[in-house]
Amino acid sequence: MKEKEEERILCSNRKAYHDYHIEESLEAGIELKGTEIKSLREGKANLKDSYAILKDGEAFLIGCHISPYSHGNIYNHEPLRTRKLLLHREEIRKLTGKVTQRGFTLIPVRMYLSKGRAKIEIALARGKKLFDKRETIKEKDIRRESEKALKEMVR
C-alpha cells in the first residue's frame, strides 16, 4: 500500500501571480538552522518581497522572513537571513541559463512541509507591465461574471 504523501502549505506568495508571468516552477529544499523549522511549523513565515539568486553555482533565498521561535531564547535565528536553496547541479545550470536571459527572475511561490521537510516552490518568472496587470484583472472579472450568470441560469 502506498504511503499517503502529506503536504502542508506554510505560506504562499499570492502577489507573485499578480506581478509576474510564471513560466515554470520547481521544488527546492531549504537549508535551515536551529529553531527555524519549529518556527515554520508554527506557520510564522512570509515570502512577500523575497526572491532567489544564483551565485557561484549555488542558489540562495533572499528576503524570506521566518519569525524567531517563541521558545527559542538565545538559540533563535536572524529572521531575514539569506538561506541556501538545495537544488541539483543540473537544475542550477538550467536555471542559470534562463535567468541570464533578459527579464527573467526567480520568485518563491509557496513554502510547504512535505514528509516533515521544509520545501519551497520557486518559479522562473518575467515581470508584468501595468497594462498586463489590468488585463489580468479584467479577465478575472469576466470569468467571475460568467460563472455567476451560469449559476443564475441553473436556478
Image (cartoon, grey):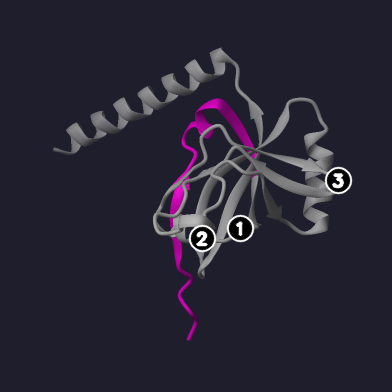
Horizontal side of 148 relative to 14 (left or right) equals left
Cα separation, mark 3 vs mark 1, equals 20 Å
The residue singled out by tag 2 in the image is 37
Of the two numbered discs 1 and 2 on the same chain, state the one appearing first in sequence: 1
| Circle nearer the viewer, 3 or 2 | 2
- Percent x, y of residue 84: 70, 51
Cβ–Cβ below 8 Å for labels 3 and 2? no
The magenta-colored residue range is: 1-24
Q: Nearer the viewer, residue 92 or 140?
A: 92
Q: Nearer the viewer, residue 112 or 43?
A: 43
The residue singled out by tag 3 in the image is 56
- Percent x, y of residue 139: 44, 24
Above or below, 18 relative to 29: above
Cα separation, mark 3 vs mark 2, equals 26 Å
Q: Amino acid at mark 1?
A: Leu
Of the two numbered discs 3 and 1 on the same chain, state the one appearing first in sequence: 1
The residue singled out by tag 1 in the image is 32
Q: Residue at x 48, y 86 (%)?
A: 1
Q: Amino acid at mark 2?
A: Ile
Above or below, 132 relative to 87: above
